[in-house]
Image (cartoon, rainbow, N blue to C red):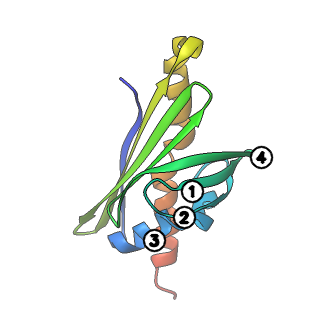
Amino acid sequence: MTTAIDTTTSIAAPPDAVWAALTDWSLAPQWMPGVSAMAGPLARGATVTFTVRGKERTALVDDLDASHRLALLSRSGPVTAVYTYTLAPTAAGTDLRLVADVVVRGPLQLLAGVVRRSIATEDGVQPERLRAVVEAVSRPAG
């Protein structure tokens, strides 16, 4: 099993508002732990550059179904991770599901469980943090 994260969060906003926040790279530092900057085109096969804990990294837009699904693939040494964000409309707004599949190769493979748990602890908060960002923006002034 390669799944490190499989979580769904309900967001009190329509899918287009959630999609707009999810794909606005300038907002990533507000909901992606450790990320201080993110930039790049939103297109299948495009490379997105992000800075995490002072180090520049890249991710590939692996899958893109506008307003519905975004998958980002990143590699760091022997670790390959695919984060898939899927939006589903609900009566109350949007369900955002995050699935992170993590493959560990080479000698580090012996620690694959530890790597996945670390990723789950660090990044499992993304949907809740994105919910807070979206709902703050979507909340009527008053």
Q: Earlier in the sequence, mark 2 or mark 3?
A: 3
Going by the numbered disc 2, the residue's amino acid type is Pro
Which numbered disc covers residue 134?
A: none
| Residue 42 as seen in the image, left or right of residue 93 | right
From the image, tell me which residue sits under label 4: 54
Q: Which amino acid lies under the numbered mark 4 shown in the image of this protein?
A: Gly
Mark 3, residue position: 20
* Residue wearing tag 2: 41
Sort mark 3 into few (<14), some (14-19) or many (20+) by Cα contacts within 10 Å: few
| Screen quadrant of the N terminus | top left
Q: Left of 18 or right of it: where is 65? A: left
Image coordinates for residue 123, horizontal then vertical, percent:
53, 42
User: Is tag 2's residue or tag 1's residue first in the polypeptide sequence?
Assistant: 1
Type of amino acid under label 1: Trp
Q: Which residue lies at the image location 58% right of the left edge and 24% below the top edge?
A: 78
Q: Count numbered badges in the picture.
A: 4
Position above or below: 45 against 115: below
Query: Where's residue 95, x and y in %?
Result: 31, 58
Find numbered disc 1 in the image and state the secondary structure of the residue it sits on: helix
Q: Do the residues under discs 2 and 4 have CB atoms within 8 angstroms?
A: no
Identify the element where label 3 is drawn. Answer: helix
Spatial distance from mark 2 to mark 3, Cα to Cα? 14 Å
Q: Quadrant of residue 115?
A: top right
Q: Residue at x 54, y 68 (%)?
A: 24
Q: Nearer the viewer, mark 1 or mark 3?
A: 3
